[in-house]
Image: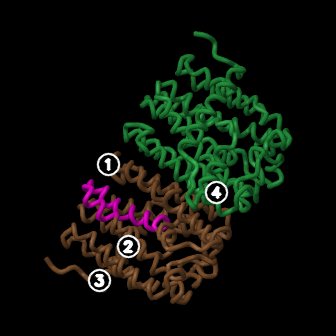
Chain colours: A brown, B green
Amino acid sequence: MAPSPRAASPELESMMKESADAVNKTIRHLLPESDLPEAPLYEAMRYGTLNGGKRLRPFMVCQAAKLFGVDEMRARRTAAALECLHSYSLIHDDLPAMDNADTRRGKPSTHVEFDEATAILAGDALLTFAFEVLSNEETHADPRVRIELVNMLAVAAGGHGMVGGQMLDLIGEGEEFDLGTISRMQRMKTGKLMAFACESGAVLGKAGEVFRRALRNYAYDLGLAFQVTDDVLDVEESPSVLGKPANQDEAAGKSTFVSTMGKEQAKQRAEMLVEQAVRHLHVFDGRADTLIELAYYVLERRA
Amino acid sequence: MAPSPRAASPELESMMKESADAVNKTIRHLLPESDLPEAPLYEAMRYGTLNGGKRLRPFMVCQAAKLFGVDEMRARRTAAALECLHSYSLIHDDLPAMDNADTRRGKPSTHVEFDEATAILAGDALLTFAFEVLSNEETHADPRVRIELVNMLAVAAGGHGMVGGQMLDLIGEGEEFDLGTISRMQRMKTGKLMAFACESGAVLGKAGEVFRRALRNYAYDLGLAFQVTDDVLDVEESPSVLGKPANQDEAAGKSTFVSTMGKEQAKQRAEMLVEQAVRHLHVFDGRADTLIELAYYVLERRA
């Protein structure tokens, strides 16, 4: 067995790029242009999703699915559904009443490009659409697989998952959170969707609990590492690199890993979490090297 | 066979009240109070759903389910999921960027009682929760039934259904719609969820297509009748009766059935639609009298 990678290879970024292109193609196919009178809704849905994101979560879905020999189109549909859901959360997050962010990935946010009402509705429609795609039989022939995906995504994305994490985030603007609360918030906000990303690949492949748990735990640790590095990037990088305003967290008076433990300790924590994430993948006996590289990529990324 | 009812009986309202109480109990059970730090989210979700609505859609679910001998708890869970989804749409509709309505059912709207960000998130969480409830095995033991409910609801509520109808509604503030466009908009905004309400009862009971189509078509005609009477009530009734501002549509410059065809013709249209709705139920051979009465109730209601 070859030793596991300890860093992201140059090939990883081209694999991610290829995977992003494939998922974008699937999203474009699922969300075609329209000439109906309500077309601005569909335009805003496309604008909010097809915006040059790195497609980290879709990459996780597809790589995890590959471990179990899942048909690529099924993986891509699941990935596209997840990305629609992720995109809805960004559209709503950017709204004036929420984070009030005018730009996203270097372009006007959806409510700036369209208007607030259209952005709210586009987010609502994308969230709903994620469940439409997952529940469609093209995503998997077995209804038990589809219903498990639907339930997992709903639990991960709802009040006890992502949206609950957003609520905590808002509450955090007014008060100081300790490290435990910040970690819990980030696990809800980011970790649960990443866990869905990785575990959904195993569900599509009807994999056993050992593999599901390994992928889930990998995702939780990596999700937290992702958020810690996000907090570091927020204080270190310029808006032009980030494609969004820098120092957003401090400006909003939010507790972050950096504000709580300092930048250097935060960086060490991220490294430790990535090592821990990678260890969960040992059950795959060297077959999960791309996901291992992905973990180092999260640590090394600059935006 | 006894002749079918031609009007709502006094018993109907008490049946509706009893059904509403049962569904509220289910919603309360599904959305328990919380002492977590993000509790305001759950409070807003409860506030936005447990607000004394008539629970028309849940009543439809339960009455349709009864035609096929469906277990009551299953019907109530489906009804509760639908009501969570309906409530999310009202919460988002009332937002300042949308209809900017300060009151709903005689009480402050969710964004007034809490704040805009919490209202947006509570709506998002309720929408997500609807799919969590439907996909849970307590709603039906057969995953094929659950996945069909999920897919039907997603299609009915998304960009080609309710949310698309909302978008049309917003666009309508700037231009005059003809009767065809208004009807299409209302079918999307209201009809599709009502069709889900009635058809879901048949899906839970694994009923054949003849019965499913009858219930679906009943719901479409009744949904349109409901909207026509809504437009009439909007110009006829006082805010204290409606529990929300009157003349909202005219103030927003929206085309309605009343503005397009006049009040008297709108009333006639509503009557005709109710007659048509009722005729679809003849396949049930007198067993669907409660749904028939419900159709007349929609016509006769004052709020």
Q: Image height check: is A161 above or below A226?
A: above
x and y percent of residue B286 in the render? 57, 17
**Whole-Å distance between the Cαs marked 4 and 1?**
34 Å
Residue mark closest to the camera, 2 vs 3: 2
Residue mark closest to the camera, 4 vs 1: 1
| SS at mark 2 in the image | helix
Q: Magenta residues?
A: A187-216
Q: Amino acid at mark 2?
A: Leu
| SS at mark 1 in the image | loop
Q: Is residue A89 left or right of residue B102?
A: left
Q: Residue at x 64, y 57 (%)?
A: A37
Establish whether labels 3 and 4 are both on one chain: yes
Q: Chain of mark 2?
A: A
x and y percent of residue A209 in the render? 27, 56
In primary-sequence order, the first of circles 2 and 3 is 3
> Which residue, given by chain and number where applicable, does mark 4 sit on?
A37
Find residue A141 and name its label. 1
The residue carrying pointer 4 sits among few (fewer than 14), some (14 to 19) or many (20 or more) residues within 10 Å by Cα, namely few
> Which residue, given by chain and number where applicable, does mark 3 sit on?
A11
x and y percent of residue B133 in the render? 48, 45
> Which residue, given by chain and number where applicable, does mark 2 sit on?
A222
Q: Chain of mark 3?
A: A
Q: Residue at x 22, y 79 (%)?
A: A4
